[in-house]
Image (cartoon, grey):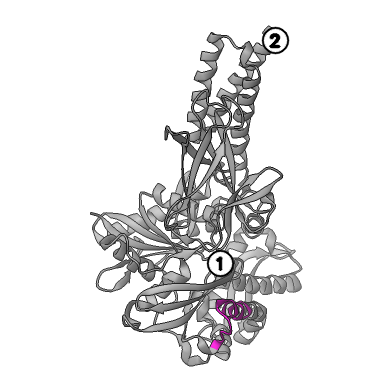
């Protein structure tokens, strides 16, 4: 059996760790304890990690950063628009229409966020194998606490594409709490802890109770656009304003300079955690109005930096207070036993000072490395799950939203109600009926949310059911719904007419994919209306095209599905003309 590792798949960096007798980070092949979550191309070669960052100056628009933010997102989602604003690479509608619903472009070629994440995870796997001198087979992969079912599912698919057997998709605050529980609590001990996770790209705060090694989550709050990157951009803006004031130029128009400025800003941020002032120096990359090379030199003090980020830090503290209020009636900061600091930005003195003002300095935990705790927790759980797949280290979570489908009048019919245990202890079933004789497929849109109007909730996917031929109208179809241990939808369907015949089902995601699903569905209905005019020969040809179309759709081959649909439409037009 291969080894099991934990992978902290971060927005800015990825860390792999293993649990032997104690947790340890697995250095990558560049001897770094983390791999930048970056993928790029240069001279037709795909680069992952530090190599991608090193070549970013040469190909800034072919370097993909923050891909985690795009996982499970639609093309026009607010998160995607924000990524466009912050980064230089193109984000486009997929040409092949597969289920991610957007693509990033490197060197003129489209890639899904799942494919980019898989490249990062594959490097983590291969580098771990190099350090362990053994095959890595299993992994627990961490995600932000706010990730939806679609985003978790996309992460799991990325892990599978990277060649990993994904044991669990684990939220980052719980992973950090698991790391904290490694050595600090006895079996009968209990604590209420708060996880303050301020990483490079996101902020999460979670309140949990721990009894022995069992963790129960009480509340999660967060801001997916608050993190160390924000602080870097504050410093960058300070330097850009200096350049504008002294030289009268807008340096934002120089992608190579902006890449170097981001690097220098991050270095300055880290330096100001231990020093009272630092210099930001970028020599010889810009020219003045006389075409002379100029050197950029800007001094930055910790006091200036803290003034820049004060509003961001205050915002994080407000979310901390909100999480405490929502964790339980009458809960106060005094009832929090420990505050675990996670993420590189939690090293910033202003952050620690602000937390100490709320909780007292003694409650801030510094024994668990903020940069590595998430990976350590994932590694421990991975090891436990190899030894015992039913390991109860993390107590069952519950759904925070309703899951259901759309019924007549755009009503939201709840199937899995909010508060249901994850994983669901037993499937929840619903019975649907075939509306017309001979119907071959049913498409059920699956939503998650709270609104009674279905379309106002989040559309997760469309569940497609391929029915046997010649079913009478009114035939009952029973569908069982459930959520697995990662909160990802599971389902199966069968005829409930006494035969128990199983029905082929699959999920369709993405606007392009959905268009072709619905076109095939429309053609089926049109063919049903023309059934009395269809010859035996035409029927046989139709059935062959239909079978090929469904095979293509279920296999995500939309090019083949498009071709079949075109032939099906042409065939129906021929039937209409011949009966003219």
Q: Residues within 10 Å of mark 2 (few under 14, many from 20)?
A: few
Is residue 525 placed above or below 298 in the rendered structure?
Answer: above
Can you tell which mark lies on residue 190? Answer: none
The residue at the point 41 percent across, 78 percent down is 210
The residue at the point 55 percent across, 86 percent down is 355
The residue at the point 48 percent across, 60 percent down is 37
The residue at the point 65 percent across, 59 percent down is 82
Q: Between residues 441 and 428, which one lies in front from this camera angle?
A: 428
Q: Are marks 1 and 2 in contact (CB under 8 Å)?
A: no
The secondary structure type at the circle numbered 2 is helix
| Span shown in magenta | 318-333
Q: Is residue 369 visible?
A: no
Q: Between residues 256 and 355, which one lies in front from this camera angle?
A: 355
* Residue 323 belongs to magenta span: yes
Residue wearing tag 1: 201
The quadrant of the rendering that contains the N terminus is bottom left
x, y percent for residue 163: 36, 49
x, y percent for residue 410: 70, 46
Image quadrant of residue 25?
bottom left
465 sits left or right of 186 in the view: right
Is residue 424 placed above or below 97 in the rendered structure?
Answer: below
Decide whether the magenta segment is chiefly helix, strand or loop. helix
The quadrant of the rendering that contains the C terminus is top right
The secondary structure type at the circle numbered 1 is loop
Residue wearing tag 2: 577
Please identify the residue farthest to the front as the structure is shown.
498
519 sits left or right of 14 in the view: right
* Residue 97 belongs to magenta span: no
438 sits left or right of 167 in the view: right
Closer to viewer: mark 1 or mark 2: 2
Q: Between residues 288 and 365, which one lies in front from this camera angle?
A: 365
């Amino acid at each position: 059996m291969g080894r099991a590792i934990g992978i902290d798949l971060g927005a800015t960096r990825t860390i792999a760790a293993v649990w032997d007798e104690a947790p340890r980070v697995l250095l990558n092949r560049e001897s770094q304890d983390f791999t930048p979550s970056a993928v790029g191309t240069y001279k037709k070669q795909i680069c992952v990690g530090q190599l991608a960052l090193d070549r970013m100056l040469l190909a800034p628009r072919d370097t993909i950063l923050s891909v985690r933010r795009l996982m499970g997102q639609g093309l026009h989602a607010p998160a995607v628009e924000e990524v466009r604003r912050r980064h230089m690479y193109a984000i486009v509608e997929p040409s092949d229409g597969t289920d991610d619903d957007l693509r990033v472009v490197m060197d003129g070629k489209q890639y899904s966020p799942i494919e980019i994440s898989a490249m990062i995870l594959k490097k983590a796997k291969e580098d771990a194998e190099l350090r362990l001198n053994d095959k890595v087979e299993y992994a627990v992969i961490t995600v932000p606490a706010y990730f939806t079912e679609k985003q978790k599912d996309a992460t799991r698919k990325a892990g599978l594409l990277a060649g990993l057997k994904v044991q669990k998709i684990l939220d980052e605050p719980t992973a950090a709490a698991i790391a904290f529980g490694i050595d600090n609590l006895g079996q009968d001990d209990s604590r209420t802890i708060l996880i303050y996770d301020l990483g490079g790209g996101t902020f999460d705060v979670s309140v949990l109770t721990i009894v022995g090694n069992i963790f129960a989550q009480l509340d999660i709050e967060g801001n997916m656009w608050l993190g160390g990157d924000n602080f870097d951009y504050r410093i960058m803006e300070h330097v850009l304003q200096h350049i504008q004031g002294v030289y009268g130029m807008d340096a934002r128009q120089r992608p190579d300079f902006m890449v170097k400025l981001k690097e220098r800003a991050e270095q300055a941020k880290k330096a100001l955690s231990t020093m009272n002032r630092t210099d930001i120096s970028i020599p010889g990359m810009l020219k003045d109005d006389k075409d002379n090379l100029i050197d950029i030199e800007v001094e930055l003090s910790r006091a200036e930096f803290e003034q820049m980020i004060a509003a961001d830090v205050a915002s994080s503290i407000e979310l901390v207070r909100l999480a405490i209020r929502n964790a339980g009636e009458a809960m106060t900061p005094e009832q929090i036993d420990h505050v675990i600091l996670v993420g590189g930005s939690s090293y910033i003195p202003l952050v620690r000072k602000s937390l100490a003002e709320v909780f007292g300095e003694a409650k801030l935990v510094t024994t668990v490395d903020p940069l590595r705790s998430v990976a350590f927790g994932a590694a421990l759980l991975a090891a436990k799950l190899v030894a015992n797949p039913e390991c109860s280290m993390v107590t069952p979570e519950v759904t925070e939203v309703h899951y259901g489908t759309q019924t007549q009048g755009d009503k939201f019919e709840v199937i899995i109600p909010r508060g249901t245990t994850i994983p669901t202890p037993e499937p929840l079933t619903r019975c649907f009926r075939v509306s017309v004789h001979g119907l071959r497929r049913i498409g059920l849109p699956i939503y998650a949310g709270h609104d009674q109007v279905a379309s106002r909730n989040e559309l997760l996917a469309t569940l497609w059911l391929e029915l046997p031929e010649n079913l009478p109208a009114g035939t009952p179809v029973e569908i069982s719904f459930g959520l697995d241990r990662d909160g990802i939808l599971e389902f199966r369907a069968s005829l409930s007419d006494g035969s128990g015949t199983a029905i082929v089902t699959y999920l369709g995601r993405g606007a392009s994919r959905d268009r072709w699903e619905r076109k095939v569905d429309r053609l089926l209905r049109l063919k049903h209306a023309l059934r009395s005019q269809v010859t035996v020969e035409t029927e046989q040809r139709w059935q062959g095209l239909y079978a090929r179309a469904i095979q293509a759709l279920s296999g995500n081959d939309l090019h083949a599905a498009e071709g079949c649909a075109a032939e099906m439409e042409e065939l129906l037009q021929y039937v209409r003309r011949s009966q003219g």
